[in-house]
Image: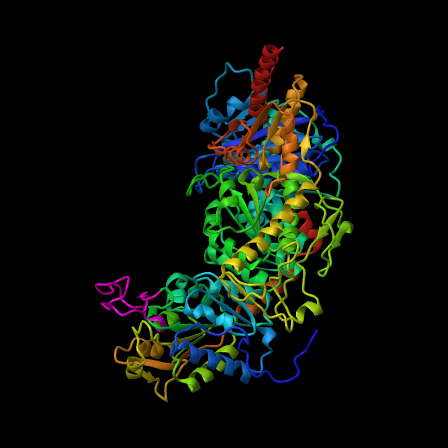
Amino acid sequence: MGKVSKPKLKSKIDFIIRVAGEGGEGVMSCGELFAKAVARTSYHVFTFITYPTEMKGGYAMTQIRIKDITIYSMGSFVDCLVAFNQEAYDKSSPYLKEGGILIYDPEFTVIDDSKNFINYPIPFSKISVDTIGRPLGKNVVVLGILSHLYGLEHPGLEKLINDRYGSKGEKVVAGNIKALKAGASAAKEMGVTTVMDLSKSEAAAEDYMFISGNQAVALGAIAAGCRFSAGYPLTPSTSIFETLSKYLPLVGGKTIQMEDEIAAISAIIGASFGGEKVITPTSGPGLQLMAEQMSLASMLELPIVIVDVQRGGPSTGLPTKTEQGDMKFAVYGSAGESPRIILAPTGVEDTFYQTIRAFNLAEKYQMPVILLTDQSIGYRKATVKMPNFAKIFMVDKYDRKTKVKIPNAEHIDLVQRQIPTEEELLDYKRYKDTKTGISPVARPGTPEGQYLATGLEHDEYGKTNQEPDNHLKMSKKRFRKLDEVSKAFEKNPIETYGDPNVRIGIMGWGSTEGAIREARYLAELEGVKIRHIHPHTISPLPERQISKFLHRLKHLIIVEENLTGQFAHFIKAKFGVKPIEVHKCEGMPFTADEIYNAIMKVARIADEDNITSS
Amino acid sequence: MKTISQAVNTYKSKSIKPVWCPGCGDFGVLAALDKTFKALEFKPEEIAIISGIGCSGRFSHYFNSYSLHGTHGRALPTATGLKAVRPDLHVITIGGDGDGLSIGGGHIAHAARKNVNLTYIILDNNVYGMTKGQSSPTTPLEYNTNTAPYGVYEEALNPIAMFLSYNIGYIARTTSTDMKSMHSILTEAIQHKGFSLVYIMSPCVTYSVLPYSKLKDIVKPLPENYDNSDKMSAFKYAYSDEHMYTGVFYKEDKSCLEERLQTVFDLAATSKTTSEIMTEFK
């Protein structure tokens, strides 16, 4: 999972472009088209999007990073900034590197000449009006400018424009193509120098996709064999349900939009009872509404997968911004004690495999699995290698022994819930108190498999039983499954990176992985070595692995995107450590630089400690 | 695997006996449902009973079927998900006036819009029985309950009129004392294609907001010449102040969720080739 044997510290090509403007101006579509065009070359692409909640207005930006090797984060500073207006310039220019390229519309933006940027004032709004009679084509004019700057060929871009605007009619497509050409020639006339010639790059390999984290969830679910989803629109998770609604019917699956999140999780519980693999995507506010039904699924021991694409909170909070604020709720949000598994993918590609893993765990252990992604992963697009479809293996329904591997590009096990044997059906105990806690589940329609699934405490047959010893026995049975999960997790490959002998360690979870990894590389360039652990399984945690990681450390940094340090609190409670906590609660992801600065600060403290002790 | 060759004698659970108070209307409904399953010759393993919380919630315990006894008010969306993936099952959902009309009331409109092919039985006793005597959405105004000791300050719902306005394709009301009517209505409702709603007045003997004697006085069958395809007339009888009419209020044949999802399949299957789909992720 996202492991590299030797980090490549240096790449030949590493460009970061930011297009900033106002929501509704086409900043997103301009960035997206440009990124898609680059993704069709052999370069890796990584995008980051942030925009306001409202339909129109407010600061919006998309950042595109192009590299010749795997990209782990959005990057800290940009090489090229396109500013659509004054606010975009004011907010984004501090992130433009010394000597970077600044493209702006002089009609709407006054710039500070004293800065050391390569300035290209190009009136894209006016160019749009002159070309197609209205200013709204300016995003495509900018795309034309960028195509000149980065040597993107027009036939490919024209096809992308056709794909995107084709449904709006030929006139719109023709107008956009005109605007594209006008932008490119304006750049030429202005004497804009081509930075790199992407047209000379080889085409991307066939087995690469350019997808968002949300799309990765939907595709992962389909690959895992999920054939039912019930959902309710909730930013920033909605595009998962949209993607499922579009593609599930193509493989014989079904999606139904429900009246609210409670109904959505209820529907997947019903469908799981019916024997299907099921998923519901949501975000924090929806997860809160689902809490009671999550406990029900734990009690009925039904496999369900819930995706929480976290956003800024509390309450309505920051619907389109990122935050790691739901961890505690995901882990502890329950009345009564109900076992569940929490997974945290680290990036787009990982999200695909962790989604498959979520289904495997849910089906095997018959409990809810919550996949905690966030807006930054969900909206981010990245080039992702397609899995090897010849290496997908079905685990038999009667199989109770097979060790299921963590899915990766070269090996995907697909688990289905165990079903009772004929012998077991002679006296069928749906909730049989087994050694592992896992008891075979009959699919409705199976003769003699009829059983009662009740949220009331019940005995092995499913019959209500509220006697003291029965409650203890069945509570233990349900939690024994979680012990089994823990044991299985301990056997996973260790998710630590960096030199095992150093005394500074850094720990994070979820989407911060890439920025931490880059920060570690930056620190290594300065001679500061650190170790990094990034568990994918938040609950249960691989405790022995973490203990081993913590054992020789002198300084532990815990990085997370929230105000109060939810993960740090969790780690402190479990391992009794005193970490240095680094939080960011701004609705924006960490950049590698911010984490690098924290590492260097700790390294200086460590140095001083060494001097004192020697 | 064992197959059941002989006709099923009873669909009731052999090991679980009802916990209802002696004289509870729900016993009658249990018997009527068992009789209906028998008449329809269902296989027990093809019946799924989904219920919520309250005295009505225990229905799922008492049948030898695939049964799910979930949380308060969520039986209907749970059953919707089940039926969406398992059209081959006979899905029966049961709730009370609290579970169905109060906490779960919001779900009825949407199950109706989906026209999911299942039968929803609501048992109305005008009171919360299991939690012991609190006001329900159908407790009459000014009646004294444990949560309204000085009299209920809310108007009672008119459920039949509500169901009519939700465009539910099969709406009937009967009483737990009328075995013949329950049996015929349940048989018709279960066979009805789409969402069917069977509303059964089932008195509580412990908190007798609606005693059998009162029920007997107010109930009146819909007239013989009543046309159950006429919605306006259905509204008129639903809003009657004089009587609580029983019988089939409304019937309409329309496409159900399973058919509509089949249409989605067909449209999806012809919409795109695999290579076209893959370019969408490039």
Q: Is residue A359 left or right of residue A27?
A: right
Q: Nearer the viewer, residue B71 or A491?
A: A491
Image-quadrant location for residue A606? top right
Residue sitting farthest toward the left: B150
Q: Nearer the viewer, residue A126 or A501?
A: A501
What percent of the width, then of the height, locates residue B267? 61, 63
Q: Tell me, yes or no, whether the highlighted magenta stretch contains residue A18.
A: no
> From what the image shows, is residue B230 above or below residue A14?
below
Q: Is residue A547 visible?
A: yes
Q: Tell me, yes or no, whether the highlighted magenta stretch contains residue B158.
A: yes
> From what the image shows, is residue A296 above or below residue A384?
below
**Residue shown at the point (56%, 49%) measured from the top left:** A340
* Quadrant the N terminus of chain B occupies: bottom right
- Point out the stretch of residues depicted in magenta: B132-160
What percent of the width, then of the height, locates residue A61? 52, 33
Image-quadrant location for residue A346? top right
Q: Is residue A256 visible?
A: no
**Residue shown at the point (73%, 35%) measured from the top left:** A42
What percent of the width, then of the height, locates residue A142? 56, 32
